[in-house]
């Protein structure tokens, strides 16, 4: 696919709504770069946890985290199964997926300085287009002019069940009730924060995948992508 035909695809939605799974698969199928913006916030959260700037059940030290941002470098490393997240050169992919990080990430992500710093990084990653990025504010804040936008949702119970299976498969000692409480808490923080709250972009296509298989979800997304590209070629035949 030539560079002039590449677009930006923004996939937003609630935690554990399947957006990362579908975004990663779509990027692989169409030859785009996949960027997990949530992993970036998790990496900052892990840095804060390691340095004592936040802990479960306590408010983050906003001043300390803001001061540390220039020392936090995040990158991605492509792997046969997808990609790993690097924090200052260290592969932290497994550690950022723990419930410990999940319990603290939403308050960290609500800090304006953190959001501004990571949004700048994300926009730089999309300069040449040809990316699929998922998160909470990709279609509303990071790339409001993205050519394709999707907003994912599923019931809190269904999302908690998915997350519970992921965590226990990795050996985490958690209960479904604990995961459900975390999911609902993150929803509330994401929806009500002052800085870039989670909301559906007016031009995003909604997808409730509560009862969809991964294969059905992927087929739906590929169909939308093909329709989007066809529509852009009709409007701009020179592309």
Image: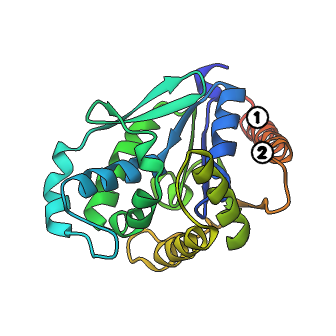
Please name the residue shown 70% across and 36% down the image: 26
Residue 34 appears left or right of 94: right
Closer-to-camera residue (29/87): 87
Closer-to-camera residue (51/66): 51
Q: CA distance from mark 2 to mark 1?
A: 18 Å
- Can residue 239 be spotted in the picture? no
Q: Quadrant of the C terminus?
A: top right
Give how far across and how far down residue 11 sits, in percent.
Answer: 62, 51
Residue 219 appears left or right of 237: right
Give how far across and how far down residue 64 sits, in percent.
Answer: 14, 62
**Label 2: few (<14), some (14–19) or many (≥20) C-alpha neighbours in 10 Å:** some
Q: Which secondary structure, mark 2?
A: helix
User: Is 78 located above or below residue 211 in the figure?
Assistant: above
Give how far across and how far down residue 182 sits, in percent.
Answer: 52, 71
**Quadrant assignment, res 214:** top right
The mark that comes first in sequence, 2 or 1, is 2
Give how far across and how far down residue 146 sits, in percent.
Answer: 58, 48
* Residue hosting label 2: 221
**Quadrant assignment, res 195:** bottom left
Q: Quadrant of the N terminus?
A: top right
* Residue hosting label 1: 233
Residue 173 is marked as none
User: Is 234 located above or below residue 30 in the figure?
Assistant: below
Q: How is the image coloured?
A: rainbow
Please name the residue shown 24% across and 52% down the image: 50
**Quadrant assignment, res 206:** bottom right
Closer-to-camera residue (25/1): 25
Front position among marks 2 and 1: 2
**Label 1: few (<14), some (14–19) or many (≥20) C-alpha neighbours in 10 Å:** few
- Can residue 202 be spotted in the picture? yes
């Amino acid at each position: 696919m030539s560079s002039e035909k590449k677009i930006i695809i923004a996939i937003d939605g609630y935690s554990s709504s399947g957006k990362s799974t579908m975004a990663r698969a779509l990027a692989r199928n169409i030859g785009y770069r996949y960027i997990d913006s949530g992993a970036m916030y998790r990496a900052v959260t892990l840095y804060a946890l390691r340095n004592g700037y936040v802990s479960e059940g306590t408010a983050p030290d906003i001043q300390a985290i803001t001061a540390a941002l220039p020392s936090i470098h995040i990158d991605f490393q492509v792997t046969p199964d997808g990609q790993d997240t690097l924090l200052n050169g260290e592969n932290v992919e497994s550690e950022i997926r723990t419930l410990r990080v999940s319990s603290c990430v939403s308050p960290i992500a609500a800090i304006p300085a953190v959001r501004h710093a990571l949004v700048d990084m994300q926009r730089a990653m999309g300069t040449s287009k040809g990316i699929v990025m998922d998160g909470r504010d990709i279609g509303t804040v990071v790339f409001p002019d993205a050519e394709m936008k999707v907003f994912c949702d599923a019931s809190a119970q269904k999302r908690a069940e998915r997350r519970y299976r992921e965590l226990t498969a990795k050996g985490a000692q958690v209960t479904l009730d604990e995961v459900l409480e975390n999911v609902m808490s993150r929803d509330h923080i994401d929806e009500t924060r002052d800085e870039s709250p989670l909301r559906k972009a007016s031009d995003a296509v909604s997808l409730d995948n509560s009862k969809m298989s991964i294969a059905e979800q992927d087929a739906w997304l590929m169909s939308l992508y093909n329709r989007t590209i066809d529509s852009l070629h009709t409007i701009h035949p020179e592309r």
